């Protein structure tokens, strides 16, 4: 059922005719070009993090070779998370990413951000894309305030800039609404509070290409409204915005183009309404 | 799903590369050249030190005695080695001022050992942070070594107290402590970067490494005098034991602190050796680490 719809997706990213391209060059500047991207996760042993026992089926010799050369084994268990996706994103676009769980949406964003190396294929970007994830690691034993400073420094701010932003970030996160939580270690926070603080830190900086991974889903309704407003503002400043969400409503409200991924393949790429309609039909069938 | 649309997207690579070049796009996550890499690392210097500070203050936050462990750990280490090697095995034979001799050896070696152990986990232990944020990955092993430096400074204060309590008098050549520590710090940072790259690829490395390091420690004259123990050994064995970087740093620190440890006990060209090892480890380690920069997010 998906195949006849993919026809129009091929046209969209291309605009191949040189004359048309030259005419549209000003407002159709590509900001992200994804070219036949493959991402593969390799798992060793039983542990997903790769810290556990070595693979049992691997011969001693290959294991030794791998140890010496530092190269990854070609065998073993693999998860082929993104299987040859290509598209071009242009300045001023807000692109929604949809697909069922495990379809490769977050993995693809990480690869675009350069945080996960591709197995093959290339990603070209304009400047350094920023990924706002809810799971940006912070240190649980540190107070919220120290985490704010640390996060700002990791994004490349100077200590002065970080200190100047601190109060604003804490105020935006709203963690101090129920008492002085910002001076408590983060392990005392509820998961919603921690997620809110992480989002507040990550969104405190200006971004050229901005990618938002499920961030709209964090926090209560009040915080969601505030963060949607923040995202709209970031979008105005940014060249291109990507948004991963399971809420069709927030995609509809914020995006003008949608990519639909299913098991690592790009199923459809087109206007928001068109793709969402197809997606809903697919999900209910 | 066999997807025609996706197949049609697979244009020759040169096309995408050519369009990317025309619009000034660059490959995402590509490794910057060495100069640019150092510049970015310098830009993140505040992150490196703040991260190290945060890590070392949180290390003992859940322990009841809290920060006191920064002092207790080296003291207990020295006590255990004194019990075993000083009292039970009697390796102290022929070594005057054995307690300062032993404790100096233990502390200096521990600095290198802990740096390497921290380095091997610097990337693999913080993958969440690496996958979430952009910064030069060398920040991780470097801040891991800075954490060890902070602990080493506490250890040095403990060491100074022990040495004075054992009858040494602070003299001008105690100032040599500073260059010795700096050179060793450079050496440790280099080793930590080697270890970080290996540990990020081969998770077995953190299992194997303690054995390698223990062997190294026993070969470095930490709890015995190499001159006395290896007196009858072949010449090449003596040379190998003498140029061993750990032994070089330990001997230099003993020379700085202990009156009865004279320059006659130092190997020839000791300062050149110390600096040579440090530069070799640091420059080699830095380049080795940088060459895999784009791969550190991978499992």
Image (spheres, rainbow, N blue to C red):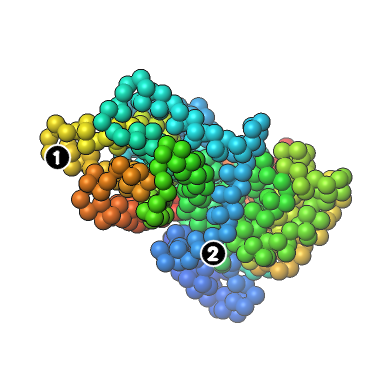
User: Compared with residue A73, is residue A243 higher up or lower down, i.e. above or below?
Assistant: below
Q: Is residue B137 left or right of residue A141?
A: left
Pick the front one: A221 or A6: A221
x 54%, y 38%: residue: B71
Q: Residue A126: percent from the left, percent from the top?
A: 56, 67
Residue on which the image places disc 1: B236
Q: Residue B232: percent from the left, percent from the top?
A: 14, 31
Q: Chain of mark 1?
A: B
Q: CA distance from mark 1 to mark 2?
A: 46 Å
Q: Circle 1 — which element?
A: helix
x 75%, y 38%: residue: A188
Pick the front one: A21 or B133: B133
User: Compared with residue B53, is residue A129 higher up or lower down, i.e. above or below?
Assistant: below
Q: Residue A285: percent from the left, percent from the top?
A: 73, 37
Residue at the extreme left: B234
Marking on residue B43: 2
x 26%, y 31%: residue: B94
* Residue A262: quarter of image: top right
User: Compared with residue A125, is residue A276 higher up or lower down, i.e. above or below?
Assistant: above
Pair 1/2: label in front: 1
Q: Residues within 10 Å of mark 1 (few under 14, many from 20)?
A: few
Pick the front one: B172 or A191: B172
Q: Chain of mark 2?
A: B
Q: Is residue A12 visible?
A: no
Q: Is residue B31 left or right of residue A225?
A: left
Q: Earlier in the sequence, mark 1 or mark 2?
A: 2
């Amino acid at each position: 059922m998906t195949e006849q719809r993919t026809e129009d997706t091929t046209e969209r990213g291309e605009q191949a005719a040189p004359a048309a391209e030259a005419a549209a060059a000003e407002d159709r500047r590509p900001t992200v070009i994804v070219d036949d991207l493959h991402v593969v996760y390799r798992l060793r042993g039983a542990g997903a993090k790769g810290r556990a026992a070595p693979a049992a089926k691997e011969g001693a010799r290959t294991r030794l070779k791998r140890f010496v050369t530092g190269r990854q084994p070609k065998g073993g268990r693999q998860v082929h998370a993104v299987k040859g996706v290509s598209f071009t994103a242009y300045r001023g676009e807000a692109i929604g990413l949809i697909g069922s769980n495990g379809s490769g949406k977050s993995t693809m964003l990480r690869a675009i951000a350069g945080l996960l190396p591709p197995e093959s294929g290339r990603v070209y970007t304009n400047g350094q894309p920023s990924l706002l994830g809810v799971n940006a690691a912070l240190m649980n034993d540190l107070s919220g305030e120290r985490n704010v400073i640390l996060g700002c420094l990791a994004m490349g701010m100077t200590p002065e800039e970080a200190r100047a932003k601190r109060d604003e970030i804490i105020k935006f996160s709203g963690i101090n609404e129920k008492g002085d939580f910002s001076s408590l270690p983060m392990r005392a926070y509820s998961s919603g509070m921690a997620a809110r603080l992480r989002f507040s830190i990550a969104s405190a900086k200006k971004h050229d290409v901005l990618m938002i991974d499920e961030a709209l889903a964090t926090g209560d309704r009040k915080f969601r409204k505030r963060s949607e407003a923040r995202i709209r503002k970031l979008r105005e400043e940014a060249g291109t915005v990507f948004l991963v969400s399971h809420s069709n409503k927030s995609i509809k409200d914020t995006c003008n183009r949608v990519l639909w991924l299913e098991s690592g393949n790009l199923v459809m790429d087109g206007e928001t309404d068109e793709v969402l309609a197809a997606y809903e039909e697919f999900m209910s069938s | 799903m066999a997807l025609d649309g996706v197949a049609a997207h697979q244009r020759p690579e040169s096309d995408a590369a050519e369009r990317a070049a025309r619009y000034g796009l660059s490959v995402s996550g590509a490794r910057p050249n060495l100069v640019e890499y150092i510049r970015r690392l310098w830009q993140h210097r505040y992150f490196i030190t703040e991260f190290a500070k945060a890590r070392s203050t949180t290390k003992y936050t859940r322990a009841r005695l809290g920060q006191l462990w920064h002092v207790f750990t080296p003291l207990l280490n020295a006590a255990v080695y004194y019990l075993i090697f000083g009292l039970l095995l009697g390796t102290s034979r022929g070594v005057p001022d054995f307690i300062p001799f032993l404790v100096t050896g233990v502390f200096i070696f521990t600095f290198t050992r802990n740096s390497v152990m921290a380095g091997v986990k610097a990337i693999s232990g913080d993958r969440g942070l690496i996958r979430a944020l952009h910064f030069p990955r060398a920040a991780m092993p470097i801040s891991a070594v800075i954490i060890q430096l902070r602990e080493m400074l506490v250890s040095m204060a403990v060491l100074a107290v022990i040495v004075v309590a054992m009858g040494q008098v602070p003299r001008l050549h105690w100032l040599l402590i500073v260059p010795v520590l700096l050179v060793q710090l450079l050496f440790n940072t280099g080793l930590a970067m080697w270890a970080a790259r290996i540990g990020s690829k081969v998770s077995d490395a953190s299992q194997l490494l303690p054995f390698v390091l223990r062997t190294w420690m026993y070969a470095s004259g930490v709890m015995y005098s190499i001159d006395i123990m290896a007196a009858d050994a072949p010449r090449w064995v003596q040379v190998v034991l003498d140029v061993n970087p750990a032994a070089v740093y330990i001997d230099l620190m003993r020379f700085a602190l202990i009156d009865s440890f004279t320059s006659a006990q130092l190997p020839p060209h000791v300062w050149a050796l110390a600096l040579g090892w440090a530069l070799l480890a640091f420059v080699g380690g830095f380049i080795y680490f940088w060459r895999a920069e784009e791969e550190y997010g991978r499992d």
